[in-house]
Amino acid sequence: MAEINLVHVYKYFYPSFSFKNFFRKKGALLGPREPHFALTDVNLTIPDARTTVVLGPTGCGKSTLLRIIGGLLPPDQGKVLFDGKDITELPPGERRIGMVFQDYALYPHLTVKTNILSYFFFKKWTKQWSDEMEMEAEEKYRRTSQLLGVKLEHLSGRFPPNLSSGEKQRVAIGRCITRDPSLFLMDEPFSHLDQPLREEYRRQLKALLSYFDVTTVYVTHDQHEALLLADRLVVMREGKIEQAGTPEEIYQAPRNLFVAEFFHPHPFLPAINLIPGDLMGPEYREKVIGIRPEDFSLRSPRVAGDYILPAQVVSVFKSPLAMEAAMRLKVKDRVFVEVPVPSGTSPSEGDEVGLVPSRMHIFDPLTGERTATHHLQVHL
Ligand SMILES: Nc1ncnc2c1ncn2[C@@H]1O[C@H](COP(=O)(O)OP(=O)(O)OP(=O)(O)O)[C@@H](O)[C@H]1O
């Protein structure tokens, strides 16, 4: 059992000293340096035995958040609770946490097997060491090798400097597992791997995480990875949490324009089409309307009715293996939208169609907040 709570967590950094920064602020030569915030009032519950994926653009504070949970960085304000207990001051070694970061941090002078069993290795010369522990370590190694795939067995006598990035990654994850952590923290662990390997390892990691049921926090800026791994998703921007929920909740009910546009599960299509409200009718005049590509259907241009938008096909694009196709349309001669090409149809440039939205998200253009979602019943 490990539920983590972050309560009003703030972290700020001071820019490093440079003469350029020093003289930039006229008349403030001796004034204090202004901190920049990496995290601002972060409140978050990380549920037990689930994988929480933290997603956000570069520099938004994802790694800082992870390091604060792991105890590698102290927060400047706020608390970290582990099953309700305040662990803000507890050193990382006492948190029962397994961490895998981009740089692997393996012991270069120890073999793969010893790296994986390093938790046991460092106990070997203490009074705690016993024959039972030796047997437990061997059994853990056997089980971990099995879970990570046979490839690990071939590497057991090699040293980290002689391993590929993928192999190092596997060893780092193996080392994490043998420690029996209550919490896994992973910071873009597959970012150095090439695409096919990354895909393979993600799937394997998903299976591992389900097998162990360990509370996991996984940081990435890769949408595809986030979707594959997340039971719960946290979208961050500029040190703040924009929205947390299941991927489905966030996709179906984005809190604001940033989340609606950022969480983007279809690589072939835009996350959402944004159109000015007045195109849908006078009642939406002061609003921005967001319509997901799959929430449009197509009708003949001759069918008229409320909420049917006359549009013209501008271009059609197909994936190389023609598994997917999308098209770009100009609506009412004013804005462009992109929608999937319905199966069994083959539209061409210049075709006239009627676009029928089934669901619209209504956003306030000033604050960017979503104020409503309307499901439309179009009467033809
Ligand atoms: N040690 C540090 N000193 C000063 N500023 C820092 C330090 N660590 C992080 N920052 C700043 O804090 C902000 C958040 O950084 P962080 O590494 O948490 O972002 P991130 O979302 O993980 O980015 P990326 O996806 O690029 O790894 C950034 O503006 C970064 O420059």
Image (cartoon, rainbow, N blue to C red):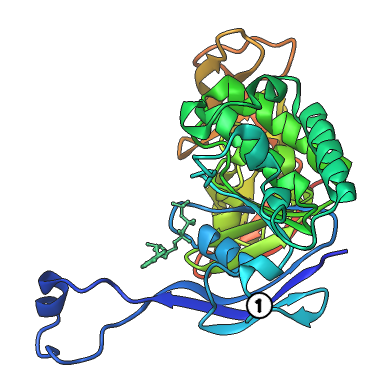
Q: Nearer the viewer, residue 79 or 296?
A: 79
What amino acid is labelled 1 in the image? Answer: Leu
Quarter of the image where one finds residue 146: top right
On the image, which quarter does residue 285 sit in? bottom right
Is 168 located above or below residue 250 in the figure? above
What residue is rendered at 54% in x and 59% in y? 62
Q: Secondary structure at mark 1?
A: loop
- Using residue 112 as the reference point, say whether residue 237 is left or right of it: left
State whether residue 159 is above or below residue 86: above
Quarter of the picture holding the C terminus: top right
- The 10 Å Cα crowd at callout 1, few under 14, some 14 to 19, many 20 or more, is few
- Quarter containing ligand 1? bottom left
Quarter holding the N terminus is bottom right
Residue 86, given in percent of the width and then of the height, sits at: 73, 82
For the residue pair 275 and 59, the one nearer the viewer reads as: 59
Reading the image, the residue beneath label 1 is 90
Q: Position of residue 112 (x, y in %)?
A: 62, 33
